[in-house]
Each structure stands twice: as structure tokens, then as C-alpha cells.
Image: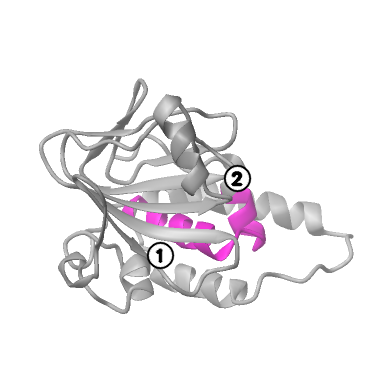
Amino acid sequence: MTRFAPSDALLAAYASGTASPGMSLLVETHLAMAPAARPRLAEMESVGGVLLEGTAPAPMREGALDATLALLDAAPSAPEEVPAANGVLPAPLAAAVGGRGVDDLRWQFRLPGLHEVVLDGFGEGEEVSLLRAKPGAGIMKHTHRGEEATLILAGEMTDGDTVLRAGDVSEADGDHDHQPRITGDETCYCLIVMSGGMRFTGPFGRALNLFT
């Protein structure tokens, strides 16, 4: 069961059609994994509708209406957990990679135990990627030049005192200095959406920033 849902700010941006393409994909994928979160989104949409009454029309993000209609068409009648397509990738994410399964993707080596696939077709300044990480692997201590949201697709990740499992969402920005590690005994898959890139901290990390 999901314990860590997207923040109110992220859900509100999605509900209003102002979330970036990558963040929208992350929210849609989270909702596919945790339909029980849909009522919370509906509340955001209702509040947004009330606030918009009497205000001048504003342009929506391109494709926002189609994405919302598709999400409503796909909404389940009961808040049950939805099994992921291809074993790991929920339907919205599977569609974003052309229906391929995780074993069919072109994973690129990043660090021992860490492989990544960068997804194409998202906005400038935003990186959307899939991470595959073996138990015990970790990401160097870092903070962010922008915003980052991570959705756990399978496996387990520990970030400080927080243990994240399938369906959980973690958000970070320049005020967060963290070092996530893969815990548990199975491979962890994550969807990561990031703007501005990472800034490594610690003696070795600061030196690495010179080359990134």
C-alpha cells in the first residue's frame, strides 16, 4: 500500500494542467499504481474549479485535456491496486516507452549496480529517466539545482529515515541533501523526473561537479 503520495503542490499543478510533461507522467503512473489517491486528486480539481470561477481564462498545457480525459476513462470503479504492465511498468509509463518491458529497454551503465534509461520527448530543461538499481547500490550524496520527484515502481529504496516501496513518491529540491540507497533483496526500479540536475556534495562529490 502506498504510504508516500505526491505533494499537494504537485497534485494541484497536475489538476490545473500546469505540471510539466514529466511530472504529469509521474502523477499518472502513481495513480495507476495507487487508485486510492484519485479522490484526493478529485478534491484538488474541485477546489481549482471553484477558484477559477470568475477569473480570466488561462491557456492549459498542450495535451492536458486529452490526458485528463484518458485518465478518467481509465479510472477503476473501486480503489484497488492495479498490477503493472510488463511486470514492472504501469500502463501510462509502458505507453511512454512504446509498450516495451523493462528487459527490452536500452539500459546505460552509470555506476556499479546502477543502470539508467533516459526517456525522450519531454520538455527542455527536464530529464525523465528510469533507474534500475541492485540491492546495496547507492547514489552519491547530492542536492539539486531544481526539483526532483522519484516514484518507486518495484523494490525498496531508503532515503535517510524514510523507506520507500512500490507506489511511493519522494520529492526533493535544493534544500535537500540526501543519499538514497537500495535496500531489501530485490532489484529496484524507479521513475525519476528532474529539472536543473544534481549537485554532488561531500569532498569527492564536489570534485565531480567540475565534470558535470
Provide the residue designation for mark 1.
Answer: 75
Q: Secondary structure at mark 2?
A: loop
Nearest to the eye among marks 2 and 1: give it: 2
Front-most of 29 and 115? 115
Amino acid tagged 1: Ala
Q: Is residue 23 magenta?
A: yes
Amino acid tagged 2: Gly
- Give me the residue at 89% from left, 60% from top: 54
- Give me the residue at 37% from left, 68% from top: 92
Q: Is residue 158 magenta?
A: no
| Side of 134 relative to 176 (left or right) | left
Front-most of 99 and 40? 99
Residue furthest toward the left? Answer: 185
Front-most of 64 and 178? 178
Query: Quick one: label 2 or label 1, which is nearer the N terminus?
Result: 1
| Side of 58 relative to 65 (left or right) | right
- For residue 139, say whether it is visible: yes
| Side of 12 relative to 78 (left or right) | right
| Side of 73 relative to 102 (left or right) | right
Provide the residue designation for mark 2.
Answer: 146
